[in-house]
Amino acid sequence: MAEKSLSRDEVRGRDWHALPPGEVVGALGVDPEIGLDDATIEERRRVFGANALTPASQRTSLQRFLSQFNNLFIYLLLVAGAITAALGEWIDAGVIFGVVFIIAIIGFIQEGRAEKALESVRGMLSTKAWAIRGKRRREIAADRLVVGDVVVLDAGDRVPADVRLIRVKNLQAQEAALTGESTAVEKTSDAVEKEAELGDRVSMAYSGTVVTAGQGIGIVVAVGDDTQIGRISGMLSEVEKTRTPLMERLDGFTKLLSVVIVGVALLTFAVGVLVWGRDWGEMFLAAVSIAVAAIPEGLPAVMTVTLAIGVERMARRNAVIRRLPAVETLGSVTTICADKTGTLTRNEMTAKTVRTAKDDIEAEGVGYAPHGGFLGGGEAIEIEARASALEAIRIGLLCNDASVEQEGDEWKPEGDPTEAALVVLARKAGLDPEREKEERPRRDVIPFSSERRYMATLVHDHEGQRFVYVKGAPERVLDMCTHEDRDGESVPLDRAAWEAWAEEIAARGQRLLAAARKKVEGLDELTEADAESGFVLVGLYGLIDPPRDEAIASVAICHEAGIGVKMITGDHALTAKAVAQALGLRKTERAVTGRELEGLDDDALRGIVRDTDVFARASPEHKLRLVRALQEEGEVVAMTGDGVNDAPALKRANVGISMGKKGTEAAREASEMVLADDNFASIEKAVEEGRTVYDNLRKAILFILPTNAAQALIVVTAILAGLTLPVTPVQILWVNMITAVTLGIAFAWEKAEGDLMRRPPHPVEEPLLTGFVIWRVAFVGVLLLVGAGGLFLWAEADGSMTQAYARTMAVNALVMGQIFYLLNTRYFYASSASAEGIFGNRVALIAIGACILFQLAFMYLPIMNLLFETQPLDLGAWALTIGVGIAVFAIVELEKLAARRGLHPLVSAADRGEAKPARRIASDGTPGVDPSARMPQKETERAGAREE
């Protein structure tokens, strides 16, 4: 056959899976027996390029490092540090620049890991291929393949390009990484429907998937970026990573804080120069000291440590965090999109139904452990008394190549998972595999193939009787049968009844197999002619990958916590719907397929994601669209996945969650969190930890900001009143660093306050500076101002104390006030005046001890006296400064008491934890959580408009 010229658009536009093999051969201009010649190979390589993925443009390490400084808060610190250095305050400047550098290093390391995702996708591609060129089978580098090359595939090979199969022999491929299908897919050379989903295009073998059985020959129809895996890689590089709620809040927080700091500094400068007529240079230094006082230098470090401790806690609960902000984001999650196989289900095929002509029998137990009995009509039955059922189970055992063996406490399958499930079923029925095989030895076998769609074995017993046992697709086995078994009696086949029973079992989401037998005489070898007619149908098996028990409980907890759970899977719609209903998902009236999604515009899709919890036969593009649609609806989305096909959606989701056991490296690199045990229950636990982290971050902010407010207020008040500064800028920076970095980090170890999973997610638009936080900052700031400033004025007026001594008292009063305020802040509204409130956090006690040691050095070491202009305090001064701390503690506890009694105007019942999530009744009659209870204001309004 003469080779022909091809264009890239011409090849990309064809539905190769829907064309007959002969038409494919003609369209690509190749003789499968000869292959392409050298001239055609070079021409096509020029047109289609190499069979390799295009590397994405990557930033240099320097660019990635510099990008860490692109933050308004960092800019503010850098400006403050630069001005401080220009004024010759090198100690202040050094500390500020050191904090900025540490923050940048942490971000640089974390971000570098994210950019490995594309490299992981490329690592999935095959490096070698067997191709027919010049009538010879040759091993060549996979990147040298071109469109039209004839490729030979054997068991164990990784498919080197997208290949249209033209000949197959029992060919099966594992495509889970690409389609999400948990079992190996049987391949055929026959054309399939043009509209077939990716997972149903059984005439194709896709690049990056693995041949698990059989052999095949195919023609390359796509290479490099044009392959399915290439398209996914392209999608991954184009997906824009969403900003986390923490990043959004920090942006709003730093902008507001920056405006306030600059505004106060300028106002103070203007009043000092224009009202009091002070020297503008002196006022400029004062303005800088206000900025230094107001900037919470320790906050970034405190937030980093809090998130890092959250990472450590989650790791102990099988959730490994790859990017720090994801810890807090988990606490904001409103919707979890979960893959079915292995995450929500056990990834252990289980035979649940045995259907005979007389009985519909349910097998108890799940997984590969052979524990459980049998139920008929909901009542326990003895399977030995049901002859047809026992015979069907025996056929499933003897027409089988799998085994299940016990290793320690676990039962491990060897071979096909579906066949392993039938072995387990036999063990539950009391059949010993070894004894059964001894009593009915196998003489011959016809292996299962995608063309035949059945497996047959020839066995004999010790009385000389010979039987052919067959199991396979029900419609195929029905064609082979003329009779059915009724408790040992052979009667004419009622095909309509069996087809109705098959549909009923399929509606439960179970996969079907049929079992039949035929008695033969004098047969020593089994041929297809012997195995395709004259059988007696014995029974049907229904098999399913059952939900995890802990996943069912975790779904219920998520619903209680106001979190929606949706299942997005590559599996079939009936199976997906049945599993979803077993899990307790709410909106399971229908399962929307990928093909249906393709016909929807973005507006219609948003309506579908609101009203549906089950999505089946989903491709990478479908998963990505679903995540985007949910985010456009105001949802904070966590997405699970294990295959390279999941990587784009994982990257787009607010929290991408990949699998640690069965996940691909590409999925792990695109995700923020990895489940070490591949278990949905670990997600629910991680969400709980995320909510704890968020609460602890709020407590840290509620602790740090009043300190800075007090320091700024001391300077501003002194200038506006025409008084001496009670605390110098370098002393202010000292207080910032030792209290924020020692006392502030103690909140990272706080335990959860109240039942976090009974609360709805915190609104994504809730700012860090709520009305209550602003009130508390002002309230405690004034308390510390009065305490520290009052002591300074008293000491200065006394006349017997130096200015340095008075300032040292003011600094110590600020520190003591914060130590006691730390104890207040351990609980938002509950009383801290208890043994648990004071001694319950061991790290807080250590931090207080460290802070006191720093203060002792600050006051009693000569070098510190020189650097910070301080003097040692006597016991009387210590008593006064500690008294300031006790007063702050008592007054704040009185404020919390007012809040608990409903007398605080800025604290609601929900804030105090008294209000549970708003309840509603779902369409299935189960109680749920009103989505408006967790939506931002504008989303609540939008939901109300929809109801109208």
Image (cartoon, grey):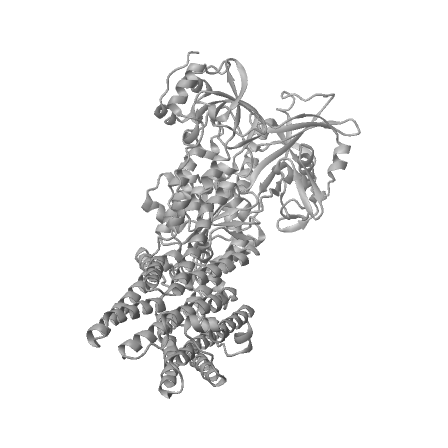
Report the label total. Answer: 0
Q: Can residue 260 be seen in this snapshot?
A: yes
Q: Position of residue 681 (x, y in %)?
A: 54, 54
Q: Residue at x 27, y 71 (%)?
A: 282
Screen quadrant of the C terminus: bottom left
The image quadrant of residue 331 is bottom left
Q: Quadrant of residue 329?
A: bottom left
x, y percent for residue 702: 41, 69
Q: Residue at x 63, y 29 (%)?
A: 455
Q: Position of residue 218 (x, y in %)?
A: 50, 22
Residue 786 in the figure: left or right of residue 367? left
Placement of 483 over or under 681, stated as above or below: above
**Which x, y percent locates residue 621?**
40, 39
Q: Is residue 930 above or below residue 424?
A: below
Farthest top residue?
A: 1
Q: Nearer the viewer, residue 840 or 692?
A: 840
Front residue of this view, candidates 96 and 161? 96
Q: Is residue 323 left or right of residue 770?
A: right
Q: Is residue 610 above or below residue 440?
A: below
Q: Quadrant of the N terminus?
A: top left
- Residue extending furthest toward the left: 274
Whether residue 784 is situated above or below residue 301 in the rendered picture? below
